[in-house]
Image (cartoon, helix red, strand yellow):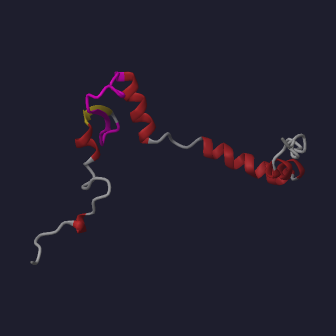
């Protein structure tokens, strides 16, 4: 069997790591951006999953879901009610409804 010709050839740094190491202005700009990005709010889905785990309903088949109310609180609700609130379910458009068919 042939040996791996690439073994030991890597310098240990990616191209971007080398770039930022040799360009301090670019690195400072990137660090400022990363700092702002990390401040962003946690998504509703992450909060819902955390609430489901805490309530003990995550993955137990009881069809309950953590729902965000308009006031910002989280309550337990039937998952179909929670997910259908936006007027349509996944993959079904309002314009796709057919009122009648010609024969």
Residue 29 image offset from top left, x and y in percent = 76, 52
The correct choice, above or below, for 68 with respect to 91 in the image is above
**What's the magenta bit mostly, secondary-structure-wise?**
loop
In this rendering, position of residue 34 left or right of residue 19:
left
Between residues 66 and 25, which one lies in front from this camera angle? 66
Q: Quadrant of residue 51?
A: top left
Left or right, residue 41 beside residue 74 = right
Q: Along the horizontal axis of the image, is 103 left or right of 56?
A: left
Q: Is residue 100 above or below residue 28?
A: below
Location of the N terminus (image quadrant): top right
Residue at image x 51%, y 41%? 41
Q: Quadrant of residue 4?
A: top right
- Outermost residue, front side: 1
Q: Is residue 65 magenta?
A: yes
Kindly identify the residue that appears in the image at 23 percent across and 64 percent down. 94
Residue 40: quadrant of the picture: top right
Relative horizontal placement of residue 44, taking residue 9 as reference (left or right) = left
- Is 34 within the magenta? no
Could you tell me residue 82's position as x and y percent? 27, 42
* Residue appearing at x 9%, y 78% in the figure: 103
From which residue to which does the magenta span run?
55-72
């Amino acid at each position: 069997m042939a040996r791996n010709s690439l073994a030991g050839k890597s310098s240990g740094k990616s191209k971007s790591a080398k770039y930022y190491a040799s360009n301090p202005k670019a690195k400072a700009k990137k660090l400022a951006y990363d700092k702002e990005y990390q401040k962003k709010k946690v998504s509703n889905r992450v909060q819902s999953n955390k609430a489901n785990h805490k309530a003990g309903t995550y993955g137990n088949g009881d069809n309950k879901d953590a729902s965000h109310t308009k006031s910002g609180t989280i309550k337990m609700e039937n998952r179909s009610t929670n997910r259908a609130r936006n007027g349509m379910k996944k993959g079904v458009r309002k314009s796709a409804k057919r009122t009648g068919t010609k024969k």
